[in-house]
Structure formats: structure tokens, C-alpha cells
Image (cartoon, rainbow, N blue to C red):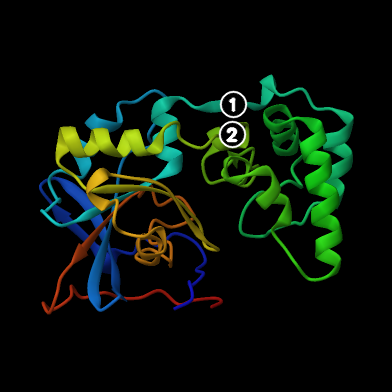
């Protein structure tokens, strides 16, 4: 099943629910490998840098969590709690970032290497020779219809850089880049140990879902299976403030009433 792209905020009043003082939104039923899974996008405050992830999960997710559920943690909120970020003012823009960004693919669903500061950050993290090689190889492969080679060469940690996005719904991300979480498997193991929650850290958007880490009890679940549970990006891509998605196998039970949004592309 392909993902669906929507315009704007997905938090509609028809799908809003309250439980234990927590607001969440029904995101519809999804069938994966014979299972029937309902997804609940959990509303939070705007989580700032340095907040305690365990405390945030205890406040917002614990009242809803049931044994057997899987909590999908957005990678951005985990990195914000780790303060694993870079401010634009600390990135010195150089010639190669300015030059190469002119030839980068532009993507209407997010910010890519066409943003010079993001490309400069990639150069800082990976070194200029690797970025030059990836840019050259990616450009040649695009001529033959093969895309994504640049990120295959530089790695998922560069693909996962988020921020420096002037059109973000949140002003802080206009001048702040969020890196991939540090030790994502260890983060998930801590959540399981302290809160007894099965969880997965994901980098999800309206194009793809990447699994970055998972709790030990989910080790036998493939990344593809876990990603398929949220292929349609139920956390949203606007200003939903729903960084946690609770996935529940409801078996043969009746699903919650859900009013789907109108897809603009599929």
C-alpha cells in the first residue's frame, strides 16, 4: 500500500479523543501481515532541547499504553531531548556548499541539499572529499534515472538531518538543524526498562520511513514490517505536535470511527 500525502494539519476535530488528560487523534486502521492495527497520534507540547524523554513519555503515552502496543518515536523529538542539534549561526558557509547546492534536487516535501547550510553541515560531518564524490556520482546516476545515490554514499545520518527549513511551521527550525539520535537502540532499551513500553525510533515523512532503533523485545520484527505500520506517516508533516504514534493490534475488534482526510496524491 502506498503512502498518502495530505495538505495541512491532520488533527481534525472528528478524529480527536481524550483519555486520562491526554489528547490523541485516530489515524485509521492499517493491515500488515494479516494483523489489524489502529494508530493513535499523541498530542504533546512543543518539546524543547534538553527535556527528559522518559518524563515526556510518562506524561503523554503511559496513560494510553496497553501491553502489546508499539510506540513509534519521531527521531526529531528524541534528538531534541538529547540536545543533538546544530544552530545555523555555528555553520560557516563555504564555497563548495554554495556551489554544489545549486545542482541539488529540490523536494517540495522537505528541505534537502539545495539548502546551502544543510549541505555545509554535511561537509563538516563527512568531509569535503566524500561529499564531492557523492555529488558527482549522484549527478551521473540521475542522468540514467537512478536517484538517491548521494544519500547512499554519505549515509543515513546525513539523510536524517532535519531543519534549516525557512518554511517550517515552527520558527525554531528555521535556524536549527536536528541530527539523528545518538544510540537509538540504547534509547529504546531504556524506555522499555523504565516504562515497560515497546518502542521504535523512526525517521518518517510523506515519502519514506526509516527505522533507526528498536527496543530489545522487538528485535525479531523486521525494519520493513515496523515501517509498514506507519507507512502513511500518521504523525503528520505540519504543526500537529504529535511526535509519538501508538500502534495497537486490535485483532478482530471493531475499529474506532475514523474520518479520513482527502489525499492530494498517492
- The correct choice, above or below, for 105 with respect to 114 in the image is below
Q: Quadrant of residue 39?
A: bottom left
For this orientation, the residue located farthest to the front is 220
Q: Position of residue 257 (x, y in %)?
A: 20, 75
Between residues 40 and 195, which one lies in front from this camera angle? 195
Q: Name the residue that disc number 2 marks.
A: 177
The residue positioned 18% from the left and 56% from the top of the image is 69
| Separation of residues labelled 2 and 1 (CA atoms) | 5 Å
Q: How many marks?
A: 2
Quarter of the image with the N terminus is bottom left
Q: Earlier in the sequence, mark 2 or mark 1?
A: 1
Specify whether 169 is left or right of 136.
Answer: left
Specify whether 91 is left or right of 181.
Answer: right
Can I make out residue 178 in this image? yes
The residue positioned 19% from the left and 45% from the top of the image is 197
Q: Name the residue that disc number 1 marks.
A: 86
Q: Are marks 2 and 1 in contact (CB under 8 Å)?
A: yes
Say which element carries label 1. Answer: strand
The residue positioned 39% from the left and 67% from the top of the image is 228
Between residues 163 and 33, which one lies in front from this camera angle? 33
Specify whether 103 is left or right of 240.
Answer: right
Say which element carries label 2. Answer: strand
Q: Position of residue 233 (x, y in %)?
A: 43, 61
Q: Position of residue 162 (x, y in %)?
A: 57, 41
The residue positioned 69% from the left and 58% from the top of the image is 148
For this orientation, the residue located farthest to the top is 90
Q: Quadrant of residue 144?
A: bottom right
Mark 2 surroundings within 10 Å by alpha-carbon count, few (fewer than 14), some (14 through 19), many (20 or more): many
Residue 23 has which mark?
none
Specify whether 58 is left or right of 130.
Answer: left
- The correct choice, above or below, for 60 with respect to 35 in the image is above
Amino acid at each position: 500500500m502506498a503512502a498518502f500525502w495530505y495538505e495541512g494539519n491532520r488533527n481534525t476535530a472528528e478524529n480527536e479523543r481524550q483519555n486520562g488528560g491526554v489528547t490523541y487523534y485516530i489515524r485509521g486502521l492499517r493491515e500488515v501481515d494479516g494483523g489489524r492495527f489502529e494508530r493513535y497520534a499523541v498530542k504533546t507540547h512543543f518539546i524543547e532541547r534538553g527535556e527528559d524523554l522518559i518524563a515526556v513519555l510518562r506524561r503523554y503515552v503511559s496513560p494510553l499504553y496497553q501491553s502489546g502496543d508499539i510506540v513509534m518515536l519521531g527521531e526529531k523529538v528524541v534528538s531534541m531531548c538529547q540536545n543533538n542539534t546544530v544552530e545555523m549561526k555555528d555553520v560557516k558557509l563555504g564555497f563548495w556548499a554554495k556551489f554544489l547546492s545549486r545542482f541539488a534536487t529540490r523536494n517540495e516535501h522537505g528541505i534537502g541539499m539545495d539548502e546551502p547550510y544543510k549541505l555545509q553541515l554535511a561537509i563538516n560531518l563527512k568531509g569535503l572529499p566524500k561529499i564531492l564524490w557523492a555529488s558527482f556520482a549522484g549527478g551521473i546516476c540521475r542522468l540514467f534515472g537512478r536517484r538517491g545515490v548521494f544519500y547512499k554514499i554519505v549515509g543515513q545520518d546525513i539523510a536524517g538531518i532535519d531543519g534549516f527549513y525557512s518554511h517550517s511551521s515552527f520558527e525554531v527550525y528555521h535556524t536549527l538543524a536536528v541530527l539523528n539520535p545518538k544510540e537509538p537502540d540504547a534509547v529504546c532499551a531504556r524506555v522499555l526498562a523504565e516504562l515497560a513500553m515497546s518502542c521504535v525510533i523512526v525517521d518518517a515523512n510523506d515519502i519514506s520511513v526509516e527505522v533507526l532503533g528498536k527496543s530489545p523485545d522487538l528485535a525479531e520484527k523486521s525494519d520493513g514490517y515496523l515501517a509498514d505500520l506507519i507507512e502513511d506517516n500518521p504523525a503528520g508533516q505540519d504543526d500537529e505536535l504529535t511526535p509519538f504514534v501508538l500502534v495497537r493490534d486490535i485483532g478482530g475488534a471493531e475499529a474506532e470511527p475514523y474520518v479520513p482526510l482527502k489525499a492530494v496524491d498517492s
